[in-house]
Image (cartoon, rainbow, N blue to C red):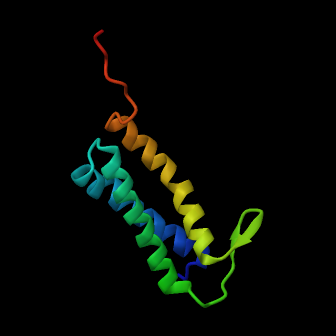
Amino acid sequence: MVLSAEWMIISINLIILYIAYYFVYPRFAGSDVNRLLVNDLLANITALVVAGALFYGSGQRFDFVFFELGWFGFTLLSFVLLELPFFWSYARRYRLFEVADRED
C-alpha cells in the first residue's frame, strides 16, 4: 500500500498530534498555557522538519480541496486544522479557559 503525498503528511501530523496531546503535553504542560504553547511550537516544528526531509526540493504540489500548496504550506495548514479537535479536548480536560471564582 502506497500513500499519496497528502495522506503521508496527514498521517505524520496525526501521529505527532496523538503523541503530543496524549503523552507529552499532560506530562510537561498540564494546565500551564505558556508551556503548552512552547510544546506545541516544538510539535509543529517537528512536523515541518519531517515533511521537509521528505519533500524539500521535490517540487511536489499538494492538493488542498480548492487550491494547491507546497509542502510547507500544506503541512502547516493541515497541522492546524487537525490540531483543533485535539486542542479543544485537551482544553476541556485541563480546564484551560475556566476563570477562577473571584471573591471581592
The answer to whether residue 6 is seen in the rendering is yes
Residue in the picture at 51% in, 85% down = 54
Image coordinates of residue 25 in percent, x first then y, are: 30, 53
- Which residue in the rendered view is the most extreme toward the right? 66
Image coordinates of residue 82 in percent, x first then y, are: 52, 56
- Which residue in the rendered view is the most extreme toward the front? 104
| 5 horizontally vs 87: left or right | right
Looking at the image, residue 61 lies above or below residue 44: below
Residue in the picture at 77% in, 63% down = 66
Looking at the image, residue 40 lies above or below residue 97: below
- Which residue in the rendered view is the most extreme toward the left? 27
Which residue is more in the foreground, 44 or 34?
A: 34
Which residue is more in the foreground, 43 or 54?
A: 43
- Disc tally is 0
The answer to whether residue 4 is seen in the rendering is no
Residue in the picture at 50% in, 78% down = 51
The answer to which image quadrant residue 80 occupies is: bottom right
Image coordinates of residue 96 in percent, x first then y, are: 36, 36
In the rendered image, the quadrant that contains the C terminus is top left
Residue in the picture at 58% in, 74% down = 72
- Which residue in the rendered view is the most extreme toward the top? 104
Image coordinates of residue 42 in percent, x first then y, are: 37, 65
